[in-house]
Image (cartoon, coloured by chain):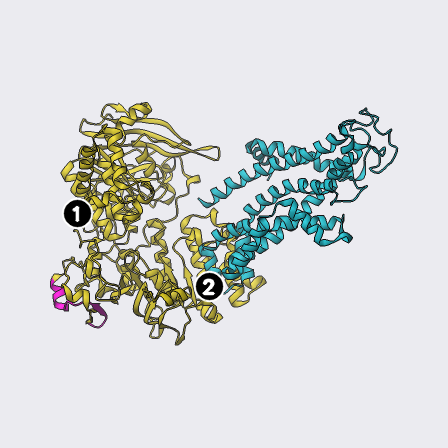
Amino acid sequence: MNLAHWFSLWRLSPQSLKIGSVILLFWLLVAVVGAVWTPYGYSQLGAGLPLSGVSWDHPFGIDQLGRDVLSRVLYGAHIVILLALAGTSLGVVVGALIGLVTAYIGGWLDEVVQRFAEAFISIPFLVLALLVIALAGPDLSGDPILIVIVVAFVYTPRIARMARAAALDIITRDFVTIAKLRGESAWSVVWRELLPNTTGTLLVEFSLRAGYAPALVGSLGFLGFGIKPPIPEWGLMISENRALILAQPITVIGPGMALASLIVGLNMFTEGLARILGRTVRLGEQ
Amino acid sequence: MIPTTNSVIAVEQLDFSYRTSGQWISVLKGVSIHINKGEVLGLVGESGCGKSTLAYTLLSYLRSNARIDNGKVFFGSKNLLALERSELDQLRGVQISFVPQNPTTALSPHIRVGQQISEVLVQHKFLTDAKVIAERVQELFSVVELPDSGALMLRYPHQLSGGQQQRVCIAMALACDPNLLILDEPTTGLDVTTQSQIIALLIRLRKQIGMAMLYVTHDLGVLAQIADRVGVMYAGHMVEVAPVDTLFEGPRHPYTQGLIGSVPDVDVRKNLSQSLRGLLERDKLPEGCPFQPRCEHADVTCQNTVQYLENVSDNHQVACQHWKSIDPGVPVDSTDLARLSVVGDRQLLKFDNVSLSYTTKSLLNAVLGSPVIPVVRRVSLSLQTSETLALVGESGSGKSTIVKAAAGILSPITGSIEFDESGLSGDVKHRTSEQRKNIQFIFQNPDASLNPRSSIEQILSRPLAMFFGYTGSELQKAIDNSLDSVRLDSSYRTRYPDELSGGERQRVAIARALVAKPKLLLCDEILSALDVSVQANIIALLRQLQSENEIAMLFISHDLAVVRNLAHKVAVLYDGELMETGQVEALFSPPFHPYTHVLLLAVPSIYNRHTTSVPARTEIVGTAAGKGCSFAGRCPWQLGELCTQEDPPWRENGQSNWIRCHHPLDELLRRSTWHVQPQPPEKLG
């Protein structure tokens, strides 16, 4: 894989993948830089006069407590991205495991797990997330680990169903029969035969879910069930500054735009990736 | 060279390319061919040689990634390639029509077959009167020998058998009385008996209607039955064109000779391994003759000299500069018979009165009292060590089901299976590790039986690690040895299945089975997805491996020619019951079981041309499963009530052959008409 190869790959890739990856790279850069350096401290009070408006020093304005909103957005980037990715990763690993194993074993276990998954899928995202937070109790409220678990919990049944559907197609292939006749354990068949052949599907599923995860994290923050202040999680910032929406709209629009562009970027990237993978998967089967 | 006015269609210097991953790949190079009025031209070649592409070009049908670089296709005085879409619409389906390979996908599943044919009439003949249309459809049905009752016209495609579907496709192609019929492998997916009926139909239609045909196939035997002239293609080049008899008796091109030599034949047992060496490597084609890298007669000049078709005689052309110095004909080497391995004296596998069913005995069935009808009924088989037993029969006869029971995928509902002097469970979970090691399965399609995400090394190392616990250098050595045993070098270790050709993949699948050092190899149609030259190599390989390692094989094949060249013993199955079983030579000589007889008559042979005889009727006059002879409904010599009501007895024919029939053996002997050719000629031609 030399430079020319990558260049030609880039040239052939769909437009959405190009735009998406540019946005995504930008936010990853911001996340890395923002974690160590911002113009002002993210919780530094008195960075400017509250409600002093947009200026070169404070492009996103100053919030009620006198904090620089841009610095808070930059610092918050890595928090939003980390929470979203960690939650999605956990959901994909657990969901894939459940989906693949139940698909292979089949029988009543498969039936029972499927019905549970359907029950959970029928509950809307946010309601399910709030339910889990309520069950976890007030002690854990605001803990980043809880947020990760909530995101994972919401995604797991959906991913399990996708993984199961992909695996059912693979299970009928002869190489799985050969492995079975050889006396391989269920675990070995899942690990060696099923997982490698479903990675394409799972990868697309991962990036699709990762695209929605910031929205979920943001919504929880907005409702006050997410990360606790003063950590500048974007949803939380929108919630904090919503009283200023008429007086100084930029303090809400700033983090709102950040969240929106991250989600759009992730989605475009995913869509492009899915198209490339879909193509190679089809070519491989011919 | 503008062909004579006698030709229906003429292709001139056609160059054709496909675009794949941004590159134009040449598929046809300088192909010229013509078809005379009322003539059947056969096109033959191995997969990827461009024969289907040429057929589609005669319809001026291009896929979106295709390009015609050069050349003309004259239909009458018109160049088809220069016509507008609207002009083509007036020709295609009217004067030139097409019969596709797979009728299941060619017919629209949600439209009644009668209506699908009438659509053609409405579109091209502008018929509007429903009564006229219905009459014409009736007429077409009787032309293709479908029962012309109205009921069949109202059926949906899935309610017809494969042969009936193909007849509907042919009827559709004939709807507007075309001058040229293009058939792309029209019998490839069909059973051999159905195939022979379709071919007989086409021969009759041609006599009646006198239309020209282009018949594309990979099967030389089929061409021997139907074609007047044959064009042989290799890597996009037309390498030889000759009348069918000349082609089989005196082929001039080294590729044609190798191809004919590779085809196993039901009439002759011959050595298949000598024929074609190497493989077609598309990315390494020389400037000149495409066959040069694999040719025995090639010299330095072949590599750079473009070969053109030269006249050998009036209508025999060959594209080889050395044709004058090459002996015409195909050497037949029958010494190979001695190479069949010696059968061991110990019984390895025994099926005792085994019945098999896919329906599980559920509670619901038990309550409703609905009987489970087994797909395989009371089958008894035995197999010695180092012996090959072939299971033969049409699709649905239960061949695969029997092998599944031996593999441990399906448990017998009655009867027992014995392996190596101990009982064998029908469920692989209840088998010992030793039994699992000793019974290995090779599937039909290597694309599906190799994990596409595993390297060859990973594929081979798994059974080695499981059965022998090899690790480290021991494992590496065993992998190298197993690749070597199937004639692949160790550079294949790091490659993935999609980087291999079909034949190489099947070799890897065989290697995976062999690393376990099995005593019994189950082979489910392992040759049918492969080209003939590859098939010949694999047959030779299997024979050699069998005698080296003393492996017994349970070998499923629909191809009687392969069976005759590979098996020691044969079992003929019909609808889940054994009809005849015995040593291969005894089975291929009279007396025959009526079903064996029907099968043998249906196999096209290149040594016995133009003798398609239409075998027995195909419509099955219902016999209740499990009662009487299951073949009774189709048997040409049925004895009325006796056959449908009573189980036929097993009759012993000599020492090694048993026939299950109500007819006495002398009666069967008297009725057998299949020619028997005891010795192949020294040399054909």
Residue receiving disc 2:
A181
Q: Is residue B247 magenta?
A: no
Q: Is residue B660 magenta?
A: yes
The residue positioned 76% from the left and 44% from the top of the image is A227
Q: Nearer the viewer, residue B103 or B62?
A: B103
Q: Amino acid at mark 2?
A: Leu
Element at label 1: loop
The residue positioned 65% from the left and 32% from the top of the image is A22
Q: Which mark is residue A228?
A: none
- Residue B139, compared with residue B494, is above or below; it is above
Q: Say which colour chain B has.
A: yellow
- Residue A94, compared with residue A245, is above or below; it is below
Q: Amino acid at mark 1?
A: His
Q: CA distance from mark 1 to mark 2?
A: 46 Å
Q: Where does residue B98 sit, x and y in percent of width and height?
A: 27, 36
Q: Where does residue A17 sit, x and y in percent of width and height?
A: 59, 34
Q: To which chain does the residue with label 1 belong?
A: B
- Residue B647, compared with residue B316, is above or below; it is below
Q: Where does residue B198 sit, x and y in percent of width and height?
A: 22, 46
Magenta-highlighted residues: B654-670
Q: Nearer the viewer, residue B485 or A177?
A: A177
Q: To which chain does the residue with label 2 belong?
A: A
Q: Which chain is cyan?
A: A
Task: State which quarter of the image contains the N terminus of chain B.
Answer: top left
Residue receiving disc 1:
B610
Element at label 2: helix
